Image (cartoon, grey):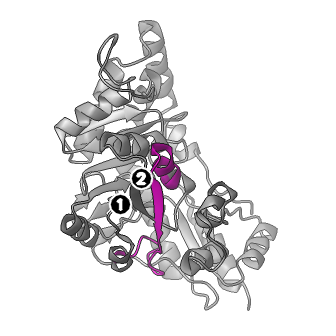
Amino acid sequence: MKIPFLNFQYMHEPIKEEIVSKFTEVYNKSWFILGEEVKNFEKEFSSFCSADNCIGCGNGLDALYIILKSFQIGNGDEVIIPSNTYIATALAVSYTGATPIFVEPDINTYNINPELIESAITNKTKAIIAVHLYGQPADMDLINKIAKKYNLKVIEDAAQAHGAVYKDKRVGNLSDAAGFSFYPGKNLGALGDGGAVVTKDSELALKIRQFGNYGSDKKYSHIFKGNNSRLDEIQAAFLSIKLKYLELWNDERKRVAKRYLEEIKNEHIILPYVPENVNPVWHIFAIRSTKRNELQNYLKEKGIETLIHYPIAIHLQPAYKELGFKRGSFPISEKLSDEVLSIPMWPGMKDEEIQYIIDVLNLWGK
């Protein structure tokens, strides 16, 4: 049996006519930037997140960058981020001129370890970015408590967590502002790049909206040096259609994850850990093994496609060599980079596909 890592057919085939019809509608309007489709989606997505404001932007990286700039974070400042995340989280900090300060993850949840944050705070620290990695919310209560003590801003990197819940609240509603990505492979994905900022702070929302539109408060009036980062009408229209199905698709992911968690039984494989107070949306289902590369090759031979998220920790990337870190600087992140393996996860996986993956994993090493 051949099983790809990701398959869009279950999501995209039933809505194809809606998508094509909406494309024709937007095309015929000939209004492609900052129109009614963007306004509609922003209203719908802010409501989905139980927040007051949503501002569409070009992508998830821009979302984080614009938030940081709107908080006036820049040269000489420091922003705490998890050492175990995709590089976009760090790049958003770097683009402002600030320095990313890495904090190790909890070995069980893979999210930033709140118990290690306080020791990383200096008089230059201005914010904490909490990444909801793989679709599982970070421990926001503890993070917010620390931030309040030191008067720091808290930003959610919710790029992988559309609809995830922490203590009965959806992500995007747990901080000063949250950045989302709508990259096609996300739980809520556009048919191209896209992103958004969600916040309860209406004054901040206005500044973010202005920053993403050349720092403009009205046409040809520029009150500060902004950026060009806007969600376009066509992608907004597509996202509005897909948002209607997001909870269904997330439930499908949870169905698959439930079977994996209950039925994969192999002493050589570590399964994800889910704290009682969170409801993840399983953007990625990441297992671990000390013989990860052997496991990946074994699954490939059996026709099961896998990916590694992420094989090289940020502090060891050539892009951040100026920070002077070496192997051993962040051993937990390095351990995860060496051991994590993402197995197939998408809405609509067939029972026989799930069963085949479980059976193949359970036989490995025996």
Left-right relation of 288 to 178: right
- Picture coordinates of residue 361 (x, y %)? 66, 79
Q: Nearer the viewer, residue 233 or 218?
A: 218
Left-right relation of 6 to 170: right
- Picture coordinates of residue 205 (x, y %)? 25, 36
Answer above or below: position of 32 versus 201: above
SS for callout 1: loop
How many discs mark residues in the rendered view?
A: 2
Q: Which residues are magenta?
A: 89-114
- Picture coordinates of residue 17 (x, y %)? 49, 26
Evaluate whether residue 193 shows in this view: yes
Q: Amino acid at mark 2?
A: Gly
- Picture coordinates of residue 246 (x, y %)? 38, 47
Q: Nearer the viewer, residue 347 or 143?
A: 143
Q: Residue furthest right?
A: 301
Kindly indicate the quadrant of the structure image that contains residue 250. bottom left
Left-right relation of 24 to 220: right
Query: Mark 2: few, some, or many residues within 10 Å (few <14, many ≥20)?
Result: few
Identify the mark at residue 76; answer none if there is no mark: 2
Q: Are marks 2 and 1 in contact (CB under 8 Å)?
A: yes
Q: Amino acid at mark 1?
A: Lys
Q: Quadrant of the C terminus?
A: bottom right
Residue topped by disc 1: 124
Q: Residue at x 48, y 38 (%)?
A: 59
Evaluate whether residue 282 shows in this view: no
Q: Quadrant of the N terminus?
A: bottom right
SS for callout 2: loop
Asked if the stretch drawn in magenta spans residue 105, the answer is: yes
Q: Earlier in the sequence, mark 2 or mark 1?
A: 2
Q: Residue at x 43, y 28 (%)?
A: 227
